[in-house]
Amino acid sequence: MPSSNPSQGALVTSAVGLVAIVLLWVSLLLRRRERLVRDLPTSKVQGVFIGLVELSVSSESEKPLVSFLGERLCVHYTYRVDEHWSRTVSETSTDDKGQAQTRTRVEEGWKTVAAGGASEPFYGRDDTGVILVRPEGAKVEAAAFFDQTVSRGHPLYLGKAPVAGVPDSTGRRRFVEEGIPLHAPVFIMGQVRERADVVAPEIAASKDAPMFLISTHSKKGVQTSYALYSWLAWLGGLGASAAAGFLFLRPVRPSWPPAVGIGAAAAVFLVAWASCWVWMVFNSLVNLRARVRQGWSLVDVELKRRNDLIPNLAGVVAGLGSHEASVQTAVAALRSQLTATRPGEPGPDIGGVAGTVRAVAERYPNLVAQEGFVRLQKQLVETEQRIALARTYYNDIATQFATRVGQVPETWLASAAGIRPEPLLQVADFERAAVKVSLSTAGAEPGQGAAA
């Protein structure tokens, strides 16, 4: 039956259609974030480089906060106090016979009477070092600290909330708090930049970063959450588009079956979603390929960094007055490794230098007492670790890229666009050693966690 108010019906149809468009956009946005989290490899702190990174660390602070409600040691917390209200509302209406009718109903709800929180820069720690994290501007997925509902007379009722209440209060208040506990495992995705006070990296908000997230959930949990809400938004958008098609067709073609309008609108929604999906996947593959190439350049950067230290090594060896052929040959070979070569291409393989330095120290014990040699040895060992981390990062992201390119249906899009996987770096002869890192900026050892 046609609507008695066509303009109102058109307005409702437009509103429902707009909801479908918004839900379509939300679904694609969440799916894009899920792909970003899944595609980016988790780095080690010592292997952090400037740019978008993903870390699994523990939250550390020398001066932790104390949460307001739960009084827990933490690096971030927010709290909220809600008060319950209830009132009876009378409504008077006139029926078809002109008689007045009065109806009463009860309205109730919760209103926030107090809220707050605090946050501070903290350190993320893993087994390789620490990195400063500035949470301002991040989306924080915190853990529950406190959740309690009390009545008047409870010490908490007025102890941690204002005396003034809300109109029609029932005398119940709900206290809720969440935050990031001290020493808790956290998942971080954000942009790395150089610190202003020391030569070291930090993670902070950036307008160029596609996402800045600090979560008490694991990487898998974050992925699952984004995927689940993406599907829910997709289903909601599909349902809203079907409803819009039904509302549009009913006044225009009342004799047509409702399934025609529902099917046509749903088809339009699916075509729009598929087109946006292709666009999103293509951009995702291009961005992932760019990160693979960036990962390869990081290996070259670390090799160049080591190459710059080799003249110091050569100077120390020359100062001994005895140029052993084996040492000189090793030095020449290492200096030739200015850039990495891809598998199957001619060029020097990446070799370790820490073993050579140890051999020199063993042959010439007097070097161990020289501060310059000790510092050089430490820097070279750290450089080997950074090369190993850069190689691991490259292999991880190249493997993810190859997996993406090889999966259906993305492999069809990759083939049409000429996108091909990148080879893996096979060399694994790197020296690894434990590195002691202090949370104190003043006590940090030279070179710890510094970005290349």
Image: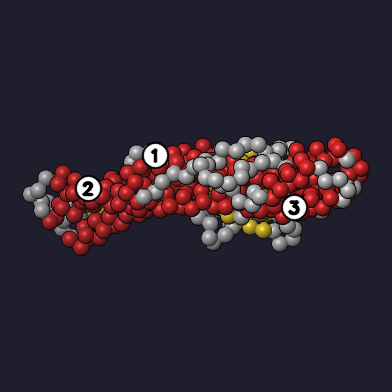
- Identify the secondary structure beneath mark 1: helix
* Viewer can see residue 189: no
Q: Earlier in the sequence, mark 3 or mark 1?
A: 3
357, 323: nearer the viewer: 323
**Disc 3 from disc 1: Cα separation:** 41 Å
Q: Position of residue 402 (x, y in %)?
A: 45, 41
Q: Position of residue 189 (x, y in %)?
A: 56, 48
- Badge 1 density bin: few <14, some 14–19, many ≥20, Cα 10 Å: some
- Residue appearing at x 88%, y 48% in the figure: 321
Say which residue label 1 marks.
406
Q: Which residue is mark 3?
A: 309
Q: Which residue is mark 2?
A: 267
Q: Residues within 10 Å of mark 2 (few under 14, many from 20)?
A: some
Q: Earlier in the sequence, mark 2 or mark 1?
A: 2
Dot 3 falls on a residue whose secondary structure is helix
Q: Which colour assignment does the render follow? A: secondary structure
The residue closer to the viewer here, 253 or 190, is 190
**Residue 36 in view here:** yes
